[in-house]
Amino acid sequence: MKPGTESQPLRVAVIGAGPAGFYVVDHLFKQEGLAVTVDLFDRLPTPHGLVRYGVAPDHQKIKQVTKVFDKVAQNPGFRFFGNVELGKHLRPEAMRDYYHQIVYTVGAQTDRNLDIPGENLAGSHSATEFVAWYNGHPDYQNRHFDLSQENVAIVGVGNVAVDVARILCRTVDELAATDIADEAIDALRHSRVRQVYMLGRRGSAQAAFSVQEIKELGNLDHAQVRVLPDEAEPDELTRSELERNPDQTAQKKIQILQDFAVAPHADKPRTLTIRFLVSPVELIGDASGHVCEMRLVKNTLQITGDGTLRPQATEVEQRIPVGLVFRSVGYRGVPLGGVPFHTSWGVIPNKKGRIHDPDASQHVVGEYVAGWIKRGPTGLIGTNKADAVETVTMMLGDLAEGRILNPARPEIDECTAWIAGCQSEYFSFDDWRKLDAYEVNRGKQAGRPRVKLTSVAEMLAVRNGN
Ligand code: NAP
């Protein structure tokens, strides 16, 4: 008999409790006439993935999406297993003994490199590490960022770069009203940062940040935005491209950047300089091996075969003094043991969410992906909704045609005993609710949305009432 009935529910495991994972669960529960129970796993005790550890602390409104996820969690078929890592606590092959379908929503857990000399000097970091650190991610609390430096460069002009720039430019009073990690506030309190550069390799029209994000930079209390007038202007190729294919978003970005370029000088303690058509080619270290200077080349744009405008280095070089560098050039997925992986794209190969094994030239029965590990690190939180719907549609099609796993132990009690045997310190959703209430309560006393627990040991202590 096909699963999906009250007497034999469809058993689904979703690995990764970020937005993509919750949207998959949500869409499964919305299927009328389908009896389904879902176990949502996360390697951290806390759910919500990048909403908790990626979204900037001064963007609390975006975090309200967790209310939608909390509603999903109220479904009687939902269970959360936090602090349970696939590969560490659970053997991936063993999952197939307990579930009919498995969905990987593990996101993109690392970052891309620049591949330039000096990239690994002291003082050069990935933006993803800095973001995880200031958001209180337990794996990043031992990181040290030398905020005694006056000059900082952020390579890349996407929304992550803008988040990092804002956090570096905001005052401690502004940050102290958010849920930024306490350790980060303490470090930022002593910050001597005065000049932040954000470096785009293409022009103002091609910048990856959103209109709202770039606009917000103009309203920082303690930092003035500086753009060089000639770099705000679109080049000739861009102008003719915009004439052929009008693009309102690009036009708005150009306008905002042109306005920044002519804005009168404001007497603010920090300056955020946004540069375009420049690429770092080397980081230079001082005698102690700490980054002290960046060598840049000016770029021009060239049109490629597929019509996109790509940067082309010129002979013109510039140098800027920098004591701290963040590369913010995109995230990258990491392979999961036993699951196919496309190394150069950094994603699990798939067709509309069905995992595809390129060696065997066929779908992997019963295994799926959604979110960044499926499509790469693009889009906003809401983008994951349509993405999850696409994956779930494939899952339902396969269920209808009987292309699912045939678990030896589909009983829920046997599964619970197996998980508890592999990781006795797992966190249920009720355990998370306890942590959540604790953090929010600590926040109330300090006039903040929450004060985060930043280590698994602290989380265990609160859960256990110690
Ligand atoms: P992103 O949007 O892909 O931006 C990456 C940036 O790095 C681009 O400017 C890219 O330039 C540049 N870059 C790539 N390789 C480079 C290289 N070798 N040298 C110099 N520059 C290079 O990635 P992201 O900022 O990490 O953001 C990831 C996703 O999360 C995005 O979809 C973003 O919108 C989303 N996000 C949203 C928010 C928000 O809504 N507030 C906040 C954070 C993140 P090219 O364009 O030339 O490749």
Image (spheres, rainbow, N blue to C red):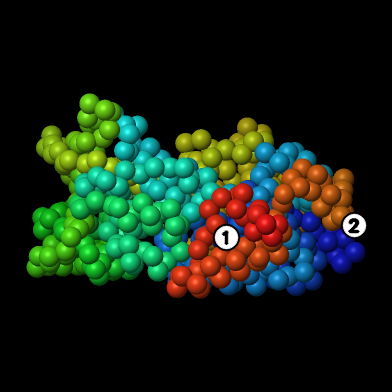
Q: Amino acid at mark 2?
A: Met
Residue drawn at x 27%, y 55% as measured from the top left: 206
Q: CA distance from mark 1 to mark 2?
A: 35 Å
**Residue 237 % position (x, y):** 18, 52
Q: Residues within 10 Å of mark 1 (few under 14, many from 20)?
A: many
Left or right of residue 77: residue 174: left
Closest to the camera, between mark 1 and mark 2, is 1
**Residue 226 % position (x, y):** 16, 59
In the rendered image, the residue lying farthest to the top is 287
User: SS of the residue at dot 2?
Assistant: loop
Q: Which residue is mark 2?
A: 1
When asked about the image quadrant of residue 387, the answer is bottom right
The N terminus lies in quadrant: bottom right
**Number of numbered discs visible in the structure rendering:** 2
Q: Amino acid at mark 1?
A: His
Tell me the number on the disc at residue 48.
1
Q: Residues within 10 Å of mark 2 (few under 14, many from 20)?
A: few
When asked about the image quadrant of residue 269, the answer is bottom left
Visible residue check, residue 128? no
Residue drawn at x 57%, y 60% as measured from the top left: 48
